[in-house]
Amino acid sequence: MMALARKTLIHLVGWSFILLGIVGLFLPVLQGVLFLLIGLLVLSKESKWAKDILHRIEKRYPVQYQKMHEFKEQLKKRFLRFVQN
């Protein structure tokens, strides 16, 4: 039951970020590419196609991918500290 809830939450959060990213591509207030990448990072936990897209991004833009990966690790550390307190 918890696995289904976790998977549903990951898909809900990931797709929400992707939708924000799509909207952000057309609105100057939102950073569309940033939200798209965050959505792909979240969905890559459960979806092979998201992992494949991130792998293509890694090959094409290695410096930006490294920065994105470092940002992901920082968020993970902050989240774990928040949950443990």
Image (tube, rainbow, N blue to C red):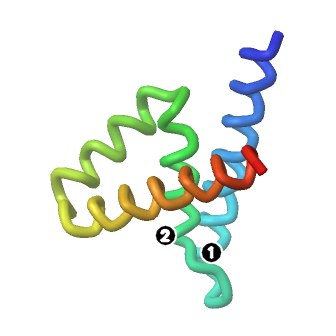
Q: Between residue 65 and residue 71, name the one nearer to us.
A: 71
- Residue at x 28%, y 54% (from the top left corner): 57
Q: Is residue 10 above or below residue 84?
A: above
Hey, which residue is sitting farthest bottom in the picture?
Answer: 28
- Residue at x 49%, y 60% (from the top left corner): 74
Residue 1: % across, % down: 82, 10
Distance between the alpha carbons at the discs numbered 1 and 2: 8 Å
Question: Sequence-wise, which precedes: disc 1 or disc 2?
Answer: 1
Please, what is the three-letter code of the amino acid marked with disc 2?
Val
Q: Between residue 35 and residue 81, name the one nearer to us.
A: 81
Query: How many neighbours does mark 1 have within 10 angstroms: few (below 14), some (14-19), or many (20 or more)?
Result: some
The residue that mark 1 highlights is 24
In the rendered structure, are the residues bearing label 1 and label 2 in contact, judged by CB atoms less than 8 Å apart? Answer: yes
Q: Quadrant of residue 48?
A: top left
Q: In which quarter of the image is residue 24?
A: bottom right
Hey, which residue is sitting farthest front in the picture?
Answer: 85
Q: Between residue 75 and residue 51, name the one nearer to us.
A: 75
Q: Which circle marks residue 33 in the picture?
A: 2
Residue 51: % across, % down: 39, 36
Residue 76: % across, % down: 55, 51
Q: What element carries label 2?
A: helix
Query: How many neighbours does mark 2 have within 10 angstroms: few (below 14), some (14-19), or many (20 or more)?
Result: some
Is 16 on the left-hand or right-hand side of 44?
right
- Residue at x 57%, y 78% (from the top left corner): 31
Please, what is the three-letter code of the amino acid marked with disc 1?
Gly
Residue 27: % across, % down: 65, 83
Q: Is mark 1 on a helix, strand or loop?
A: helix
Is 47 on the left-hand or right-hand side of 22?
left
- Residue at x 44%, y 38% (from the top left corner): 50
